[in-house]
Image: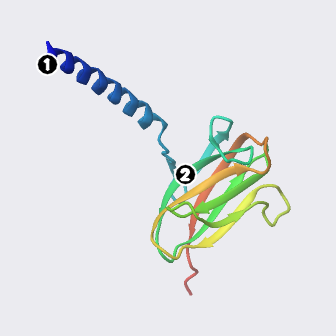
Amino acid sequence: MNRIYWGCIFGFFSVVGLANQAIANEMMYRPLGIRSGQEINQRLSDQDIPTGEGGFARDYAITLQEGDQVAIDLLSDDFDTIVLLLAADGSTIAENDDAADGSTNSLLFVRINETGRYIVRVRAFGETGNGDFSLKVTRLQPIRE
């Protein structure tokens, strides 16, 4: 009886542990991928990542090479955009709020100093911004004479 009892208890906790692991896997941070030249048209909403400042953000992973010169263009007619480039450790490499054209869109130029995986973060300025946006990351090419 003792073996059966402990076997049932062990089996129960094994099933509970597997269920908890499945839930944890669903909730893990998994940024969407983006490639150079790819344009993404999506929607920022309250279902995205809370920023801790009252708003929400959406992340995209990209692998960049040392020496890459990158333009990150974020456009929205629905909210005032902010774009950030984050290192794998979460530190901010660069960010832009409003592009030089006077709009509330964002345009970020950055030179990559280290090969690796980076995160492009889309967010709204302020607490209530959400809506449709367009994001494009472009590797810039030097002009050859």
**Label 1 – label 2 distance at C-alpha:** 51 Å
Say above or below: 98 vs 7.
Answer: below
Residue 66 - label: none
Q: Residue furthest bottom?
A: 145
The residue under label 1 is which amino acid type? Arg
Q: Residue furthest front?
A: 2
Say above or below: 58 vs 18.
Answer: below
* Whole-percent x, y for residue 135 in the image: 64, 52
What residue is shown at x 41% (from left), y 37% (from top)? 25
Q: Is residue 95 left or right of residue 66?
A: right
The residue under label 2 is which amino acid type? Tyr
Query: Looking at the image, which is closer to me, 86 or 103?
Result: 86
Q: Which secondary structure lies at badge 1?
A: helix
* Whole-percent x, y for residue 125 in the image: 78, 51
Q: Which residue is mark 1?
A: 3
Which is more N-terminal, label 2 or label 1?
Answer: 1
Question: Could you classify mark 2 by the number of other residues whose Cα lies within 10 Å: few (under 14), some (14-19), or many (20 or more)?
Answer: some
What residue is shown at x 59% (from left), y 57% (from top)? 120
Residue 101 found in image quarter = bottom right
What residue is shown at x 14% (from left), y 12% (from top)? 1
* Whole-percent x, y for residue 134 in the image: 67, 48
Which quadrant of the rendered structure holds the C terminus? bottom right
Q: Is residue 55 left or right of residue 66?
A: right
